[in-house]
Image (tube, helix red, strand yellow):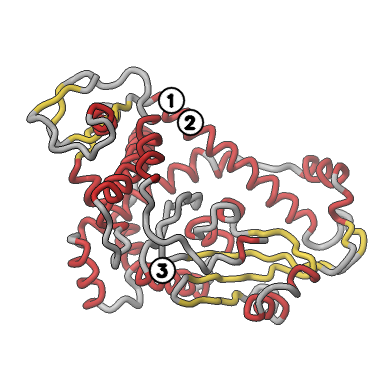
Amino acid sequence: MTSYFRFSFPAAWRLAVTTIALAAVAAACQSKPAAKPVSASAWAVVNDHEITADDVDKAWRRSNQGGQTLAEDEVFAGKLALLDDLISQEIFLARARELAIDVPQTELDSAMGEARKNIPEETFKQELARRTLTEADVREGLRREMLINKLFEREVSSKVTVTDEEITAFFEANKAQFNRPEDAYRVAQIVVTPVKEPQITNRTGSDATTALESVQKYRMIMEKLKSGAQFSELAADYSEDPESAPRGGDLGFIPLSVIQKYPPRLRDAVLKAKPGAAQAIGDRNGFLIVLVLGKDPAGQKDLSTPGVKDAIRDSLKARREQLLRAAYIDGLRNAARIESLIARRVVESAGKVPGPAPAATTAK
């Protein structure tokens, strides 16, 4: 259960990230790339759509952790990683356009208002100025997130079902898992950290990268919980733990003997909490929101035991959804025409941070 203890985080970028990020971007280059002239500012071309240096720089400013002085190659490595994200986003957005998926203005206004809730106007303006962004930039980023979320809800989540027959078959094949030698607690979590995560698996791609962002995100999640939002939906949308986010934050049943070894604050958050009431633990290193879904006493359970069928259904659905999502993404990327121009230039410069591109170039 190491996912509970996420209060010590890595420091700055390491030089090795350059190699990793470059490999990820280079791997994005698929067959049938675009073959027409592109602008000098283009870093990549996705289905004839340019992703420019300015697009990447703007994404970098959105995710800038602040308070860190990074070397030129460290900044460049971070931008390469973001480029790979932007390539994926462009592929997803193109598919959303094909399916006529849209975000109504009223819906975007509501989401923007929710995101800014409890953030003083002056604080919001100061953060925009620090990152050299406009409110329109923030709205556009949110719109893209919402479109992608809608795409995966329609093309992945809505297509995954679990039948009663499948639940019964799973139980019969795994009866030993439902024989508790001791009391256990079923726990879910939402993790928010103040640093950029190496892997994000939540449905919105949400990742707080500064202390201020983590506080704002934590408050937003708590407000949504108070307003009646489902914990599992918020965990799937916003939790930064790559293992539990796809399962709606569900960590399964944890034996009492394991919980008793947790640090006091975490142990009490589980053992003293009322089922269904979220408990928050946080400091400058991040926030952990814990929800006890129920207590399972020792003994053999069957399908008539409260919570057993729901637990099996949720587990099977999460597994299938994760598998379908990965296959769906692979299919979209394989069908796309992708050319990473910046990766080519890095190779040509023998690993050095490349200078400005020529006035005009052509994607191969």
Instruction: Please tell me which of labels 2 and 3 falls first in the chain.
Output: 3
Residue 47 occupies which quadrant of the picture? top left
Identify the secondary structure beneath mark 1: helix
Q: Decide: marks 2, 1 in contact (CB < 8 A)?
A: yes
Residue 86 place in picture, x, y as percent: 32, 42
Mark 3 surroundings: few (<14), some (14-19) or many (≥20) residues within 10 A: many
In the displayed structure, does residue 41 sit left or right of residue 8?
left
In the displayed structure, does residue 173 sit left or right of residue 288?
right
For the point 82% across and 67% down, the residue is 296
Mark 2 surroundings: few (<14), some (14-19) or many (≥20) residues within 10 A: few
Q: Decide: marks 1, 3 in contact (CB < 8 A)?
A: no
For the point 75% across and 75% down, the residue is 260
View extreme (right): residue: 300
Q: For mark 2, what is the residue? A: 330
In the displayed structure, does residue 133 sit left or right of residue 183?
left
Q: Amino acid at mark 1?
A: Asn
124, 310: nearer the viewer? 124
Mark 1 surroundings: few (<14), some (14-19) or many (≥20) residues within 10 A: some
Q: Which mark is residue 214?
A: 3
Instruction: Please tell me which of labels 1 and 3 falls first in the chain.
Output: 3
Tell me if I can see residue 67 in this picture: yes
Q: Which mark is residue 334?
A: 1
18, 81: nearer the viewer? 18
Q: Count numbered badges in the picture.
A: 3
Residue 162 place in picture, x, y as percent: 70, 43
Q: Amino acid at mark 3?
A: Ser
